[in-house]
Image: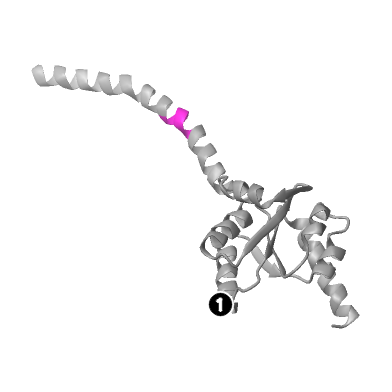
Amino acid sequence: MLRAEKNEIVDDLRGIFNDAGVVVVTHYMGLTVAELQQLRVQMRGEGALFRVTKNRLAKLAIDGTPFAPIGGLLTGPTAIAYSPDPVAAPKVISAFAKKNDKLKIVGAGYAGNLLDADAVRALAELPSLDELRAKLLSLINTPATRIAGVLQAPAGQLARVLKAKADLG
């Protein structure tokens, strides 16, 4: 690999590390190309990405980024999963690792902190950003719906009384 190609890869990885909300470090030893492709498709479906990395180039790229603490995890056959949403990548990786024991979660970086494999699995069980937004909107809409129902109730009762009066008389 030429020096220019290595510099381009390091710059690309540095951009990933600067923009990502979470980076999960994995070992993928024994996974077939088809399994890796399936994982990549699942990751893209959730707004995350999966990339096999060269450890030495990744270590160069993380210097000066919030993910500098994960440098010690970059040993062996390493791949990273990353996403802007701090829950998306851990959720997909954890689900895939449960089904396929060849993928090992080594750890992750989140908000300048180093997480172990158990913390990544715990992060994966949190609701996603979209799920949290939906819950928040439903909580906001619920009182408005109840207020509208309460305000309409007297008008409905009045209409029923008037109809009963008209039917009698």
Q: Residue 105: x and y, percent? A: 65, 59
Q: In the depicted view, which residue is nearer to us: 128 or 57?
A: 57
Q: Which residues are magenta?
A: 141-145
Find out whether residue 142 is within the magenta segment: yes
Query: What's the residue at 62%, 55% (across, down)?
Result: 90
Q: Is residue 131 above or below residue 5?
A: above
Task: In the displayed orientation, state which residue is furthest to the left.
Answer: 168
> What residue sits right under mark 1 in the picture?
34
Q: Is residue 29 left or right of residue 140?
A: right
Does residue 33 appear in this view? Answer: yes
Quarter where residue 64 is shown: bottom right
The figure's colour scheme reads one colour
Query: What's the residue at 64%, 49% (across, down)?
Result: 118
Q: Amino acid at mark 1?
A: Ala
Find out whether residue 55 is within the magenta segment: no
Quarter where residue 44 is shown: bottom right
Q: Is residue 120 left or right of residue 110?
A: left
Q: Residue 51: x and y, percent? A: 69, 69
Does residue 23 appear in this view? Answer: no
Q: In the depicted view, which residue is nearer to us: 30 or 47?
A: 30
What SS does tag 1 mark? Answer: helix
Question: Quadrant location of the C terminus?
Answer: top left
Q: Residue 48: x and y, percent? A: 63, 61
Question: Quadrant location of the N terminus?
Answer: bottom right
Q: Is residue 143 above or below residue 112?
A: above
Q: In the depicted view, which residue is nearer to us: 36 or 155?
A: 36
Q: Please name the predominant secondary structure of the magenta segment in the image.
A: helix
